[in-house]
Image (cartoon, rainbow, N blue to C red):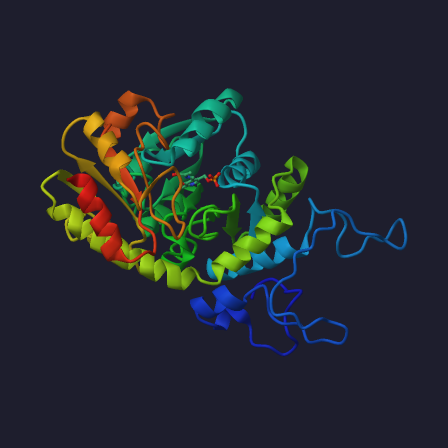
Amino acid sequence: MAQESQHMQPGSAPAQAFGFATRAVHAGEEVDLREGATGEVVAAIHLATTYARRKVAEPGRYEYVRLQNPTREALELKLASLENAQYGLAFSSGLAAETTLLLALLKAGDHIVAFDDLYGGTRRLFEQIFANFGIEASYVDATNAQLVENALKPATKMVWIESPTNPLLKLADIRAIAEITRRRGVALVVDNTFLSPCLQRPLDLGADVVVHSLTKYLGGHSDVLGGALLLNDKQLYERLQFNQNSTGAVLPPFDSYLTLRGLKTLALRMEQHGKNALAVARYLEKHPRVSRVLYPGLESHPQHALAKAQASGFGGVLSFDVKGTVADAENFLERLRLFTLAESLGGVESLIELPAQMTHVSVEKAEREKIGITDTLIRVSVGIEDVSDLIADLEQALG
Ligand code: P1T
């Protein structure tokens, strides 16, 4: 492991030598059997907000919870290990992580090139918050790396992509874009929320910073709001740490614990999400009421080969269009019994939503139409239930 762990057992093998599922269970929580240590097998929840010092000029290892917290540190070590990163920071939400990163890397006059399909809240952050501070974003179809390069301006400091994107499941060739950004001296940020480090590790493909909404697969149980940044650049890490402490968006200890707990089953969950999503996608593709299905695991997905080349699985999210009107789509959603009509994704339970009226309502209609988010597009986060039950529910609601 790159960072020294508080919980590292003396003489134990470096955690990075272990496989992904092993690190998901143990990294950041190695049992400490040293004299005086408890030997506990699970990271403790440390709730103290402040720490005593013996002398004014001699703070201890911990000072104040916004700056350091042992439970959050255990999570940051686990996350860094899973993304093959040197450094990790955990935030109070995905958007808090994004905000802290943008504030650290950009100033007035700077420019961002972003994928035209992104989580609606990320676009809103660029358009309705950072635009007010003189930071401009332009949007390109990053399925074509050349379009990303063409959009770079002298003021461009950052390229921001999701792959697969939310909600259209488009892919960016991360290696190809990283080659461009490295050559042009621009930071490449990859939001890896949809696949999680279990299936895709953007830093290994050349990205500079990975962003996560921990609220999704990493927490995994729809009971934690959190975010993370993972990276290898020490200077940037120190700046982010300073900015996080100065602006305050840290992940609380209890939420850090819940995320640590969720992460232990990440490999198992992603396997089941992927199997179920592929079966649901194949079912929908054959249904006469469905006009298109977007899922990178389908042979019909235009970037299926890229999906196989840069990730080890396709994830649990898919989107599809039902034939007919918006009212038909709404009726279908409201007839479902097992799928829950709700925003968010990545939890063990199946969720379903209408992006145009829910997660992407903040993206203007003209822009939604331009990129392909139709009013009848339905996004599904396929859970880990019995897939026969999921398909039966879709069947009865499609009618
Ligand atoms: O909700 P929060 O933890 O702040 O994360 C924001 C975020 C960032 N990146 C991606 C790819 C996301 O999907 C999200 C949040 N998305 C939803 C709530 C949603 O239903 O799509």
Name the residue at 31% across, 38% down.
167
Residue 91, quarter of picture: top right
Tell me, yes or no, if residue 239 can be seen here: yes
* Quadrant assignment for ligand 1: top left
Q: Residue furthest left?
A: 288
Residue nearest the observer in this picture, 55 or 237? 55
Residue 59 is situated, as x and y percent measured from the top left of the image, at 82, 52
Left or right: 240, with 46 as reference point: left
Left or right: 264, with 28 as reference point: left
Above or below 225: residue 233: below
Above or below 318: residue 61: below
Residue 31, quarter of picture: bottom right
Residue nearest the observer in this picture, 371 or 176? 371
Total of numbered circles in the picture?
Answer: 0
Name the residue at 21% across, 45% down.
394
Q: Quadrant of the C terminus?
A: top left
Residue 273, quarter of picture: bottom left
Q: Residue furthest bottom?
A: 11
Q: Quadrant of the N terminus?
A: bottom right
Tell me, yes or no, if residue 85 can be seen here: no
Residue 128 is situated, as x and y percent measured from the top left of the image, at 46, 23
Residue 366 is situated, as x and y percent measured from the top left of the image, at 27, 21
Residue 369 is situated, as x and y percent measured from the top left of the image, at 24, 26
Left or right: 255, with 178 as reference point: right
Left or right: 101, with 275 as reference point: right
Residue nearest the observer in this picture, 81 or 275? 275
Name the residue at 54% across, 38% down.
96
Name the residue at 62% across, 62% down.
43
